[in-house]
Image (tube, helix red, strand yellow):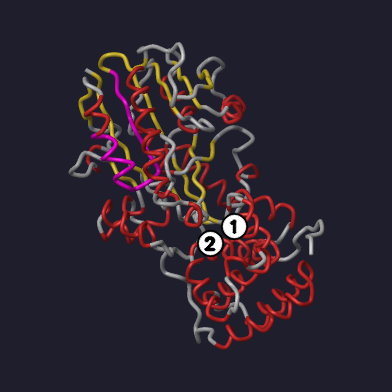
Amino acid sequence: MKDQPRVPRTAREVAVEVLYRVTDQGAFAAAALDAELSRARLDARDAGLATEIVYGTLRTCPALDRAIAPLLKQDFARMDAVTRTALRSAVYQLQHLSRVPAYAVLDETVRMVRARRGPRSAGFVNALLRKLATARPETPGPAPRLELPAWLQAGFTASLGAERADKLVQIHSLAPPMGLRVRAGTEARQALAERIQAARPEARVELGALSPHALVLWRAGDPRTLPGHAEGEFSVQEEGAQAVALSLGVRDGERVADLCAGHGGKSLLFAEQVGQGGQVLAIDVDERKLERVEKERRRLGVPDGRIETRAIDLGVGVGSLGASFDRVMVDAPCTGLGTLQRRPELLLRRQPDDIARLASLQLAILERAVMLLRPGGRLAFAVCSPLDAEGIELARALEARVPGLTRAQPEAGFASRLDADGVLRIGPWSTPDSASTPDAYQVVQWLRT
């Protein structure tokens, strides 16, 4: 039975549609959820329920599958995708959402499956969920941790130690926060926080602890509708990413290259730091991402000509560029495993061989980055992964292959946070409220002699 064009109308319909798109069509959870919530126009409470079902199901998917599989005669992985997705979302609600009545979960899930897959599938789902409902915990509670495959749990523990690894995978009651980088200084940040809180009384708004420019928001909705967006007073950037950029210590008048710049969040911060006499070059292989840099530059009021963009495949070379930059940032393509709280779909997609494949590319890009540094210039290498194979091991490999590099401490007050191996590791352990910094980063820096 083929799907018919439809617009989800309830929180559970939105959640199932998003989960189906993520698990079976390769979508990213955050983007798919935003799109479906916009189409459905749910109120704040139902939007919150849909968000919790989506993130909760993805974060605990292996455990949900283990609960369902013993009741099946067929291979769960070979089941029709929509039916499988509806079952997972329903079991998550039964096991972890105490405020949701079991009958509501069963009735709406069966209705959804009947509408999309017919009465036979609906009858099967009804019988299965009734059995699972009898085993529902007396007091369902939130899952305490992400469900990691054994290879990844071992990698996190070996790279971070048990305490940090545990902090990284703890699930907090709220969905991951949205980070804003305020264009002006601390005084403007406080004023903007108060304006946003007044406009969104249901939101939680806090000042960031790692970046003096950061606001951390929960339940704030579309950032484009917040006070200050139209005026270019802030950009959307997670606080850890701000800290990574600040640790490079860019100064007025310098020439800076931002490699693997993506949508240019760090490039735009650097453009404010270099001032009128400086210059920032944002490099990425994807021209479409670089087009957004120019649009955001105009919105933020960064002067024309302060940022140049260039599409270069750094895995191949540096084009016509030479060793003319004071500082170079490499936020390299990586597994992204430090972002599992906000991108739990990676738990379904990443495999052990991804690490070696990406590490090879990272090392090639780092060697190109050194070619852009003037003597005395500073290079920062960052990844949003906590694994040693994407951090300290790559740093040592670069030092063995490229002469003339001296390990340097990060700037802007981050030197005190260095670990004994000379790596700056940012994550939930970096701030008193670990929920405000859910992503994990590694940063290593060098001076070129």
Answer whether labels 2 and 1 touch (C-beta < 8 Å): yes
Residue drawn 60% across the image and 86% down it: 131
The residue tagged 1 is: 23
**Amino acid at pointer 1:** Thr
The reply to whether the magenta stretch includes residue 393 is yes
The residue tagged 2 is: 58
Residue drawn 48% across the image and 65% down it: 173
Q: Residue furthest front?
A: 74
Residue drawn 43% across the image and 52% down it: 351
Q: Which mark is residue 162?
A: none
Q: In terms of depth relative to the viewer, which is nearer, 323 or 243?
A: 323
Q: How far across and how far down the image is residue 395, in percent?
A: 27, 34
Residue drawn 43% across the image and 26% down it: 315
Q: How far across and how far down the image is residue 100, in percent?
A: 61, 77
Q: Quadrant of residue 321?
A: top left
Give above or below for 278 relative to 44.
above
Q: Quadrant of residue 373?
A: top left
Please state the extent of the stretch shown in magenta in the rendering.
377-396
